[in-house]
């Protein structure tokens, strides 16, 4: 019985890993065309937002594609609380998220302004 549970756990882990990767598949060229809403904050080096509180806006260039997709999904689902990001993510399709993630993950020096 212990071997069976080990096999089930391994299959589940592989499935989760493949699902995480599949969600991040996108077209970087299409993603570049979708950065208009990103550039106003993420495209300004050292930018700090004042709403809802003051904090440094994270740089997206070079971020792992899977992380970007999961973050955008979290904003869209209401699991992440930043109001501006929630509003932006609400209108993004799964393909939009994948394309943006492919674009930003392609080059660690890239920002939304490029």
Image: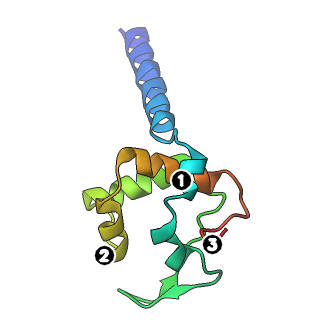
Secondary structure beneath label 1: helix
Q: Earlier in the sequence, mark 1 or mark 3?
A: 1
Q: Relative to residue 90, is residue 81 depicted above or below?
A: below
Q: What is the quadrant of residue 4 in the picture?
A: top left
Give the percent coordinates (x, y) of residue 17. Answer: 49, 32
Q: Earlier in the sequence, mark 2 or mark 3?
A: 2
Residue ID at (60%, 49%): 29
Q: Specify the farthest residue to the left.
A: 78
Residue ID at (49%, 84%): 55
Q: Relative to residue 25, is residue 113 depicted above or below?
A: below
Residue where numbered disc 2 is placed: 83
Residue ID at (44%, 17%): 6
Q: Earlier in the sequence, mark 1 or mark 2?
A: 1
The N terminus lies in quadrant: top left
How far separated are the C-alphas under marks 2 and 3? 22 Å
Q: What is the quadrant of residue 94 in the picture?
A: top left
In the picture, the disc for residue 113 is: 3
Residue ID at (51%, 46%): 66
The 10 Å Cα crowd at callout 2, few under 14, some 14 to 19, many 20 or more, is few
The C terminus lies in quadrant: bottom right
Residue where numbered disc 1 is placed: 31
Q: Is residue 43 left or right of residue 18?
A: right
Give the percent coordinates (x, y) of residue 110. Answer: 69, 64
Give the percent coordinates (x, y) of residue 85. Answer: 37, 70
Q: Nearer the viewer, mark 2 or mark 3?
A: 3
In the rendered image, is residue 64 in sight? no
């Amino acid at each position: 019985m212990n071997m069976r549970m080990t096999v089930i756990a391994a299959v589940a882990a592989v499935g989760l890993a493949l699902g995480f990767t599949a969600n991040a598949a996108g077209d970087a060229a299409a993603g570049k065309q979708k950065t208009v809403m990103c550039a106003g904050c993420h495209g300004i080096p050292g930018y700090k937002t004042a709403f809802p509180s003051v904090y440094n806006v994270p740089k997206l260039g070079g971020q792992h594609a899977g992380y970007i997709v999961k973050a955008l999904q979290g904003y869209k689902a209401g699991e992440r609380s930043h109001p501006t990001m929630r509003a932006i993510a609400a209108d993004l399709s799964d393909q939009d998220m994948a394309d943006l993630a492919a674009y930003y993950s392609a080059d660690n020096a890239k920002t939304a302004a490029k």
